Image (cartoon, rainbow, N blue to C red):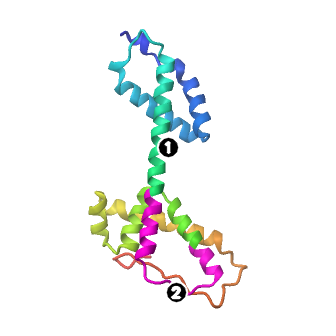
Amino acid sequence: MTDKSFDVVGLLPALLRYARALVREPADAEELVHETLVRAYERRGSYDDRRALRPWLFSILHNQFVDGHRRRQMEEKAVETMAAETMAAAPAPLPVDADTRVQLCQIHQAFTRLPEAQRAALHLVAVEGLSYQEAAEALGIPVGTLMSRLSRARASLREFDLAAAPASRPAPSSSVPLKLVRGSNGEK
């Protein structure tokens, strides 16, 4: 195999077009092409230069897309399972009015939209009650990284809170107040 037979530069526009057709988001398409090229170079030894390079790369790109899609589905299912288990293990809920139920549902949705790393850090500290040190050890990251992820997660949830509850809307008088969850060092 010669290096000329493995020249992917000319195929980048076509790979990017196909990736955009699959994922529709430009940044995600670029990431998919990047993953494809990494995989192609990792498997470069298995490439038969008697075959056309373009279909081989399209095949890798497609497989990367399918693998990513399956991985996201499994992650979503794991989050749903975790939520169902959490709800089943939770104490009987306090009676709440419809506005509070809607707000709790929105908070849950905002939580599930957090990036996985932030969601994991916030869950371990806020829900499971682990100290920062324990949570960092469980995630295999430094405490500073954990604190950064917590800060970003909390900021995202605060932005959601500000966007979801405009100041012009009066708070329902009969609602149950939401509990502020603090980390082990007393931070919000």
**Dot 1: what SS?**
helix
Q: Which residue is mark 2?
A: 94
Q: Image quarter for residue 24?
A: top right
Q: Residue furthest right?
A: 168
Secondary structure beneath dot 2 equals loop
Residue that appears at 31% across and 66% down = 135
Circle 1: is it few (<14), some (14-19), or many (20+) Cα within 10 Å?
few
Q: Which residue is mark 1?
A: 69
Q: Position of residue 123 (x, y in %)?
A: 40, 68
Residue 6 in magenta?
no
Q: Is residue 97 above or below residue 66?
A: below
Residue 127's label in the rendered image is none
Instruction: Tell me which residue sits at (37%, 9%) in the image.
Output: 2
Marks 1/2: CA distance?
A: 38 Å
- Spot occupied by residue 97 in the image (x, y as percentages of width and height): 63, 84
Crowding at mark 2 (Cα within 10 Å: few <14, some 14-19, many 20+): few
- Which region is colored magenta? 78-104
- Give the quadrant of the C terminus: bottom left
In the image, residue 109 lies at what x, y percent? 56, 65
Name the quadrant of the N terminus: top left
In this rendering, the answer to whether 104 lies above or below 24 is: below
Q: Residue at x 36, y 21 (%)?
A: 44
The answer to whether residue 95 is left or right of residue 87 is right
Check the image and report above or below for 133 versus 170. Answer: above
Q: Decide which of 9, 57 is in the foreground and name it.
A: 57
Along the viewing direction, whichever of 185 and 122 lies nearer the viewer: 122
Residue contact between numbered discs 1 and 2, judged by CB atoms under 8 Å: no
178 sits left or right of 170 in the view: left
Q: What amino acid type should be assigned to the residue bearing mark 1?
A: His
The kind of residue on which mark 2 rests is Leu
Taking 82 as reference, is 141 left or right?
A: left
